Amino acid sequence: QVKSVRLSADRYYEARFVELLVEGVRQALPTDGKALAELSGGLDSSSIVGAARAGDARQLETISFVYPRYPEADERAWIRLVVEKNGFPAHELDAGEQLPFSELPAEFYGEPNLALAYHSVMRRYERFVGDLGAEVVLSGNGGDHVMIGDCPFPLQLADRLAALQLRHLWSELKDWQQNELYRRPLQFLFRRFAFEPCVHYWRGEAVTPRFLIRPPPWVS
């Protein structure tokens, strides 16, 4: 069981999180040899690159998929901001040179997945990593799971209630109501995403809303 962390203010949680992130990235880097960090310019990959710089990483380089032919998918503006900020050598692969399904894998796949569509791009990527001699590749994949970024519900409201930060809770409830698609009543949002998660937490249960963890009706 993971031990609970109790600190006196939000800023201390933020500082502790940064310490753990920097230490985690430091532990993932090889003591000798080259490492690569995938960099899209988004929150997860940019945080990893910034943590590597804060941890005084030496032999780190970044690799990014770019799409010069498709401006709506091209993230070079954000990627280059991070590169300029942290100063690591940077590499870019033009992922738009190979269209989806331009090359099919020879190996067997048990079910359809995105790897089938972008097989040719991933082959280029794997060759590049091998030619560069990288021993470790850091990735932001999974960052949303750690930070609940892939949860479309404001479970952070329960933190405000548990800390009795009622003014902040009221303000954030109203913000969420005004910006969500369905404009559900404040009472509903309070009960579903503040009160009920707190009760589950105090009982030692999962705080995830029960309707998210129930199996679909077709699972027997």
Image (cartoon, helix red, strand yellow):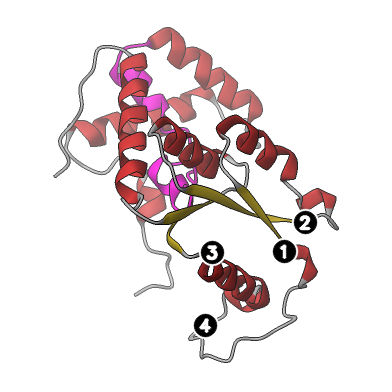
Q: Are marks 1 and 4 in contact (CB under 8 Å)?
A: no
Q: Mark 2 highlights which residue?
A: 67
Going by the numbered disc 4, the residue's amino acid type is Glu
- Mark 1 and mark 2 residues within 8 Å of each other at the beta carbon: yes
How far apart, in angstroms, are the residues tagged by discs 3 and 4?
32 Å
SS class, disc 2: loop
Comparing labels 3 and 1, the label whose residue is closer to the camera: 3
Q: Which residues are drawn in magenta?
A: 138-165
- Who comes first in sequence, dot 2 or dot 4? 2
Identify the element where label 1 is drawn: helix
Q: Is residue 109 magenta?
A: no
Q: Main secondary structure of the magenta part?
A: loop
What kind of element bears circle 4? loop
The residue wearing badge 1 is 95
Residue at (44% x, 52% y) in the render? 142
Q: Where residue 116 is drawn, which disc sits there?
A: none
Q: In the rendered view of the protein, which quadrant contains the N terminus? A: top left
93 sits left or right of 67 in the view: left
